[in-house]
Image (cartoon, coloured by chain):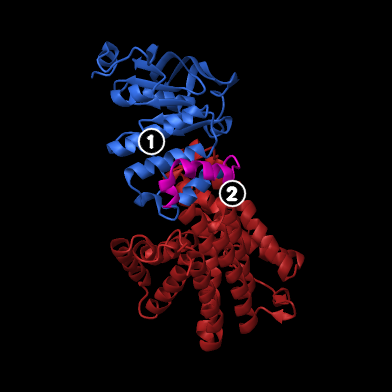
Chain colours: A blue, B red
Amino acid sequence: MLRVEGITAGYGPVTILRELSFHAQAGQVTCIMGRNGAGKSTLLKAIMGQVPVQSGQITLNGVPVHLLPAHKVPGQGIAYVPQGRRLFGPLTVAENIEVGLLTRNKGPRTRDFVLDLFPRLRERLDQVASTLSGGEQQMLAIARALCLEPSVLLLDEPSEGLQPSMIALIRDTVLRLRDTGLATVLVEQRVDTVLRMADRVAFMAHGRVEVDVPREGLTPESTLFQKFVGV
Amino acid sequence: MTDGAKVWGLHLLVLAAVFAAQFLLPPYHATNLARIMVLAVFAMGYNIAFGYTGLLSLGHALFFAAGMYGMGLPVWHLEWVSVPALIAGLLAGGVMAGAVGVLALRTAGVSFMIVTLMFAQAGYLTLLYLNSWTGGDEGFVVASAARQAFGFSLATDTPRFTAAFVLFAAGLLACLWLVRSPFGRVMVAMRENEERSRMLGYDPFRVKLVALILSGLYAGLAGAAYGMLFGYVGASFATIQYSILPMLYVLLGGAGTVLGPFLGALLMFYLIDITSNYTDAYLFVVGAALVGLVLFAPKGILGTLRERAWRWLP
């Protein structure tokens, strides 16, 4: 599926990721945890081509994607929901979804699929995106990414700043998507969320994945959380 | 009433009112309105680039002048007639915008503004330098023999108003269709967040280039029509003033609104027309009006109206 093999990447002269290796499997949720500055978000940006990869390679089903310009990566089947959601504020819910559908020429079937996942969005199709609540904006950001019909979904802290009921709703949605065979990479800081969602957990420090373990065996008291997240 | 019905109803009502104005206004104001309609088409083009796609350009005088000279030079040197010459002007604006865009769109923000200004200045100086071909600073008069279309003289009031109206109506409806089309959504997405658009698979360079070419086609057609309807082609239309004017029209009327450029052109034209009767320092009044706009309605008149009441306004 998605394989990141020994990549070094960063911003100009500043190296953030150092010979990092990582993989994500279809039908699994892989959570990435680590302290601030560990390189979690940079890893997602490197996969999306937003941060140049200096060495190593990133492949999706064996096809290299790290050499592609950033705007061609989504076309390979990788969708990304960045931290902070970043919707197109003046456009309505329907128009935001339309912009997501157009890029890969997806039609009503995909539109219905994402609106069935988030019925609350269907009720607000004509509402301007900037006036939605935080949770609804997050739903829309995920819905818009799913319009690409990706095989890999990258989510950067989707629960940040949301109330518990919204976090639960988004968690349930991610688990439903996992059951459809989607590979999900989730950057997350909340231990309880990770323990409920993850199939595997990759712990990052200093620009590397230091530990990559199955969720089974992890508990809220595990020393790995203390060591890599500080909780 | 659905939002779509309101949108079409409002725009058709405005078109009907503008068409009827020629029968109600004295000739002086009817001619002014014809001029305003052509300038509004220019501003609509600017609005596509700036208001919808977020491209702040100071080079649109070049596209306007490309259209004007693209029409005027074949008439002058090759004795072309009106319709082919207008088409040549339209294409000249689009080609010029494409050529400038391929280079200038490698920059963004303030750099893009400066690079487009530089190209426009280079174009202006080229017109002066090639004065044996272009008429230089003095320009040239478009031969009245070429100002005939479908058996009517475009130099006379009613055909001129009608031609300006047809141009304006076509430009307005095409703009309305464009901004409500899928590509229109993508332009707004690009304006709002270029990186996010890229992450959805859009190539920002390509989207912005297409938007700039569409903008250049509008500017080129407006320039060609201005020369054809008012009978004069000159280098003064390539000066920076003609890059700033459409920006002012759009800012005043409301950037990112379809009717904003027309409203802005109408108000700004008469603000200058009236104040220049009283003082040579009329630009001071224009400046004061713009300061007031920034303070009380920074999104322009229709942008503010949309924000406060008519949310359906495109």
Residue designated by label 1: A170
Q: Is mark 1 on a helix, strand or loop?
A: helix
Percent position of residue A91, x then y:
44, 52
Residue at disc 2, secondary structure: helix
Along the line of sight, which residue is nearer the eye, B62 or B304? B304
Q: Nearer the viewer, mark 2 or mark 1?
A: 1
> How far from the left and from the top, in percent, is residue B205?
55, 41
Residue occupying image coordinates x 35% and y 16%: A204
Residue at 62% across, 63% down: B221
What residue is shown at x 47% (from left), y 47% (from top)?
A: A96
> Residue B300, located in which quarter of the rendered image?
bottom left
Callout 2: residue from which chain?
A: B
In the image, the segment drawn in magenta is: A103-124
Front position in the image: B195 or A181: A181
> What's the CA distance linking mark 2 and mark 1?
37 Å
| Residue A22 visible to the viewer | yes
- Type of amino acid under label 1: Ile
Disc 1 chain ID: A
Query: Callout 2, which amino acid?
Result: Val
Residue B235 position within the rendered picture, expressed as x and y whole percent measured from the top left: 57, 63
Residue A11 in sight from this viewpoint: no
Do badges 2 and 1 share one subunit?
no
